[in-house]
Image: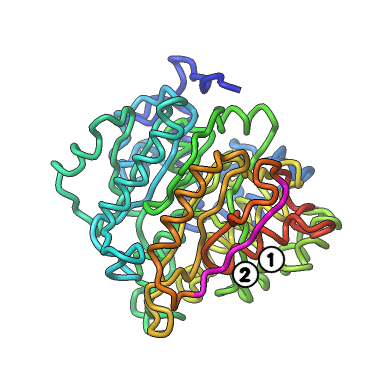
Amino acid sequence: MTSSSPHTDENTPVPSRNGTNSSFKIFLLLTSLAMAGLVRNKSIYINVESINGVMKTPNIENLAAISDFGAMRDELLLSDSIIPSESQNHVVKNTDVIVYLAQFGHHSSYGQQTDGVNEITGTSKLNHSLTTLYKNYVDDFPCDVIVFYSEDDSPDPELLQELKKGRPRLRFEQLEGQWWSLPPGLSMSTRRSWKLPGFSVGYRNMIRWYSKLIWPYLDALGYTHVMRMDDDSYIYSTIKYNLFEYMRDHNKRYAFRQPCTDSVGIGHLNDLMDEFLKDNPNATTPELLEHYHQDRKLGFYNNWFMADISFFLSPPGSTFLDIVDRSHIMYTQRTNDLLIQSTLARLFLQPKEIQWFQDFTYQHVTISRRKVESGCPSVGALTRGEGTDISLWRQRSDEFISRFSSACHLHATVRKDDRAFNNSAYYDCIGSKLCTMEILAFENGHYLQKIASH
């Protein structure tokens, strides 16, 4: 499949300062109310009839009746504070977007980083990631690419211009104000009581961005589908078809590249979900709930994911996201976006709507700073794409292994599902314990096969 992404009609409503489009005014009103916690949960979540995203929603005419806010003056709908700041004059000509959230210096939580041998910065990682992305995908299937950065970061404008060279449709946008802030009702004065204090406030803002805020932001710009890349996400083999078109043509609403497990802050998330399902038993199915209960820690390593944005803006997903946001657990417990996204996808989507892409080589690795395993992969892996040329894979995997000392205990797995690699001594996955999930998924009867299609 090589078809290009569809374009919206030239009259498609887009965010603007004058706010003349009434439907966009309504969106801004609902967004501001929801983010302020003023629209009540039970009013947003009305008569869930499907887990496939087709839901009944409140009648706009009755907004005053279901909101504490009551009537709102028209001029308040046009407030710049609820419009994505640097995108107000950007006319979207494409419904698909690839996004990053970058740090141009050292990581706010991990500090100075290495690739196993050499010191690396946020800028060097981002540049390499963009190079692999454009070479192996965007040059063949053009789409918008946005690199977001926080109001805590101030990259040199000349650096941004340098990064744009030879990379069409790449732009940079700063997140500020309500798009990069604590949720309503949470004060910085409570920070000393937050779990895992080594993770910065910026890290927790990142969790909130990818869990809650990114969906209305991109929707306001006219996008319908998104792909996330981290600044240290690397695509190392050519993708020969349009991933966004594949998602649409096959009715996929969420996609991932690597499975994983995580448990930080999961207890509080479980409590919220259990209560939610108790109040809304029709939000999921017995089969999905059974698979979810087999291992709640199982998730999708979402440094790379794709999503139909409407899924996260529609009940029951959007309703549960509001509950999570008001609970503050993304900050107080460091319950992360990986678990939140994975939980919503596993419970509110059918397996046929979740795609596990496996046909491109992908790397995302976090290097440990712990004294015992310093300089070794602690999370993530280099994973071979099915059908990858053997010589190219050997070169890539050998280079990866050579960066780490013999003291590092590299996990590796071999999968015998690709004829070209049968009887090969080369691994399919190299890195952390994440590789264990790769091989388990291909064992007959493993429940990961029942969670996603591949």
According to the image, label 2 marks what residue? 269
Q: Residue at x 56, y 33 (%)?
A: 243
Three-letter code, disc 1: Met
Q: Residue at x 72, y 51 (%)?
A: 416
In reply to whether residue 312 is colored magenta, the answer given is no
Q: Quadrant of residue 221?
A: top left
Res 283 seen here = no
At label 2, counting other C-alpha atoms closer than 10 Å, the crowd grade (few under 14, some 14-19, many 20 or more) is many
Q: Which label belongs to residue 450?
A: none
Label 2: which secondary element = helix
| The N terminus sits in image quarter | top right
Contact between labelled residues 1 and 2, with CB atoms less than 8 Å apart: yes
* Number of numbered discs overlaid on the protein picture: 2
**Is 169 placed above or below 316 here?**
above
Q: Is residue 313 left or right of residue 20?
A: right
Q: Position of residue 12 (x, y in %)?
A: 46, 20
Q: Is residue 190 left or right of residue 274?
A: left
Between 372 and 203, the one lying in front of the other is 372
Give the CA distance from mark 2 to mark 1: 6 Å
Here the colouring is rainbow
Three-letter code, disc 2: Leu
| The C terminus sits in image quarter | top right
Q: Is residue 196 left or right of residue 278?
A: left
In reply to whether residue 415 is colored magenta, the answer given is yes
According to the image, label 1 marks what residue? 273
> The magenta stretch spans which residues?
409-417
At label 1, counting other C-alpha atoms closer than 10 Å, the crowd grade (few under 14, some 14-19, many 20 or more) is some
Between 76 and 411, the one lying in front of the other is 411
Q: Quadrant of residue 314?
A: top right
